[in-house]
Amino acid sequence: MSYWRLLLIPLTIFLFFSTTLGASDEGEVTTGRKFSLVVQAQLPLVRDPTVRRYVQRIGQQIVAHLENAEFTYNFAVLQESHINAFAAPGGYIYVHSGLIQRVRSDDELASVLGHEIAHVQGHHMVRQQQDTKLLSYAGLASLALTIINPVLAAGVSSISGVKQLQYQRQLEEEADYRGLHYLAQAGFDPYAMPRFFETMQQEDRLNGVDVPVYLRSHPLSKERLSYIERTLKTLNWNSRAPIDTFELRRVQTILRASQGSRSRVLADYERQVAEAPDNPQALALLGTALLQYNDWQHAQPVLEQASAKGIHLNRELGIAYFRLGNTDRARQLFLQQREVDPQDADTHNQLCSLFFKEGNQEEAGKFCRAALDLDPYLDESYMTLAQLAQQQGKSGESRLLLAQAMELQGRMDAALNQYQQATQLLGSDHERADELAAKTKELEELVSQLGKSLRR
């Protein structure tokens, strides 16, 4: 993967949005919201809760230390091997799974997220705006496809002139400056930013291709690295050695397993265990990989070994026991994990599924709602609540919950149908009638403009 491809799509996003947004925060939020719906519908989002929680934790740690967060920030991961990250207006930030697999520490991922947050905080998408008309869903869909297809992205980018590229360079330097401060304020190592960029440059030298001149003028270059280094020297911050976190390696294992060959991935982790049989982390990573391939039978003893050696993955082990039919042991492990980490949304989600399977509607509903309070993107909890509502004779509520689950799954045409049915069943006097009407109108516009491309 060429290092310059890392630069390509954020530039496309920037130039495309910068000529179409209004200057208000409201305009940015509206466009970002519309873009997020298109992404859900057309791009492969990583839905694994461990991955999403990890990226959210890093991103929100930075946001929590901002002096004035301009927006409510949302962080998502795209299942895409290209090394890339980009920010859409209104606080929507996306990271490719390929980038997460390439970073060597939390600090390096934080350096990327901090830079993207700086673009949003600095309103860089509107700083050279030429038109106040917001993008249509069709326009946003075309843009979303360029994120996955770098060749299309290059075509969009090449439309922009040298003057716009020069302005982009100034904004990139501003984002670097802000981003470095954000990292230091949030407790991350600011020196991780040049470390990550230098790694990308080394990769470019090993796998480089001919790059158009207009991309070579993009500020992610030797000049930009020099600017970052000068800034760090001026601020007199100390660097520290990268910390290899087990959480990051677990996330990377999940992403590898979701994209790589089963035989190759498992062989790699089995080799690590063979080389260090007493290393509980090696066992835990092998067990994590086995879980991703739904190999519950082999995952369970490996995870038990890791637990016996000091790595406690109660939720993962509970999932293995639950899928193997041992609900008593699974419940015990899930409840233990809930005590250890009450903010673990998927543990609540798993308890919801377990109690639903056992026919305990009250407990199932309680844990599903708790899961969604912690993570509103858990479509599985919405699906279970929909089944509970249907069992209780609440057809309107069931349709609404199904609609919310389908929207998260990117099934916008089906979601619209469920929202319309929910509206009819709940009636105009329902407390959420206005919200339903707004959501229905939003998806009607989306489906109308994108048509068959949304029908999966």
Image: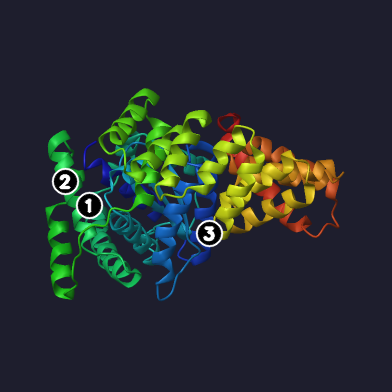
In this rendering, the answer to whether 161 lies above or below 172 is above
Across and down, in percent, residue 73 comes to 48, 61
Rendered residue at 55%/31% (across/down)? 453
**In the image, residue 176 lies at what x, y percent?**
25, 63
- Name the amino acid type tagged 3: Val
Rendered residue at 46%/59% (across/down): 91
Category of crowding for the residue at label 3, using alpha-carbon neighbours closer than 10 angstroms: few (below 14), some (14–19), many (at least 20): few
Q: Is residue 420 visible?
A: no
Q: Please name the residue shown 26% across and 59% down the image.
A: 172
Q: Nearer the viewer, residue 302 or 287?
A: 302
Q: Quadrant of residue 428?
A: bottom right
Answer with left or right where residue 399 lies relative to residue 68: right
Figure check: 416 above or below 90:
above
Q: Residues within 10 Å of mark 1 (few under 14, many from 20)?
A: some
Q: In the image, what residue type sits under mark 1?
A: Phe
The residue tagged 1 is 196
Depth check, mark 1 against mark 3: the one in front is 3
Local crowd size for mark 2, using a 10 Å CA cut-off: few (<14), some (14–19), many (≥20): some
Where residue 201 is drawn, which disc sits there?
2
Is the residue under label 2 in contact with that under label 1 (CB below 8 Å)?
no
Q: Which residue was labeled with disc 3?
A: 340
Q: Quadrant of the N terminus?
A: top left
Left or right for 111, reference 376: left
